[in-house]
Image (cartoon, helix red, strand yellow):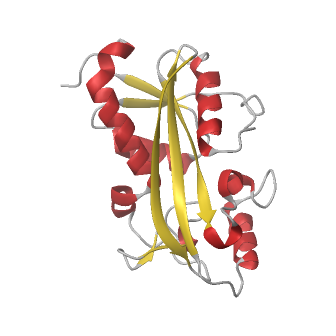
Amino acid sequence: MTLYCATTNPGKLREFRLALEDHFDVQPITIAKGEEPEETGDTFEANANLKALWYSERAPGPVFTDDSGLEVDALDGAPGVYSARYAGAAATDDANNRLLLERMRGITPRTARFVCVIALAARGRLIGTFRGAVEGELTEALRGGNGFGYDPLFFYPPFGCTFGEAPLAEKMKVSHRSRALRAMKEWLIENQAALGGRSPG
């Protein structure tokens, strides 16, 4: 069964495919730059849902979108839904990380979590949302060149390293995105008939 996804982030697309390729053919939707829906929600769920509904009217089959980010306790949950644009609308990962380090300078505790909400829709109808989260701490400097986003700042105690230092296969066992994707995959395996797809063999 083919599932369509809406992302321009190559790191996310790689993780989507790794999590789902054993059961589903994941294909990205191509939308012209500047035509994407505006993320106006104030929660991850709201943004994931509005994007999924918008893309579902343009995709040839079921489509999923994700909204994800980093919540820092000492910053009252910021950057949260603004994680990708924390340092501005066109911010780079480096700019976002530098701003977060600046705002967290000398602050403890440094507890934080990654959150991901996946929304699944088809033909203008929201089918379901799936949430994943993982707890960790912020380091005081970038560590590791793997991953993307805030991965080099997110220390995961059971690994003893940041997500930026962890191999992708290890990160995908525990990450917020992999947990949300796993929940969606399990639901789809049980409910594919409702979407017009065949059960995976």
Q: Position of residue 197 (x, y in %)?
A: 32, 15
Q: Is residue 48 visible?
A: yes
In this view, the residue farthest toward the bottom is 106
Residue 153 found in image quarter: bottom right
Q: Looking at the image, which is closer to me, 30 or 197? A: 197
Q: Looking at the image, which is closer to me, 84 or 80? A: 80
Residue under the image location 38 percent in, 66 percent down: 167
Query: Above or below — where is 186 with respect to 106?
Result: above
Quadrant where the image shows the N terminus: top left
Residue under the image location 71 percent in, 39 percent down: 41
Q: Position of residue 83 (x, y in %)?
A: 67, 56
Residue under the image location 50 percent in, 43 percent down: 13
In this view, the residue farthest toward the right is 88
Locate residue 120 relative to residue 166 in the image: left or right: right
Residue 170 found in image quarter: bottom left
Q: Looking at the image, which is closer to me, 82 or 63? A: 82
Quadrant where the image shows the C terminus: top left
Q: Position of residue 78 (x, y in %)?
A: 69, 62
Q: Is residue 149 visible?
A: no
Query: Above or below — where is 117 with respect to 113?
Result: above
Query: Above or below — where is 155 with respect to 200?
Result: below
Residue under the image location 71 percent in, 71 percent down: 100
Locate residue 198 relative to residue 85 in the image: left or right: left
Q: Position of residue 42 (x, y in %)?
A: 71, 44
Figure disc tally? 0
Query: Above or below — where is 132 with respect to 145?
Result: above
Residue 38 found in image quarter: top right
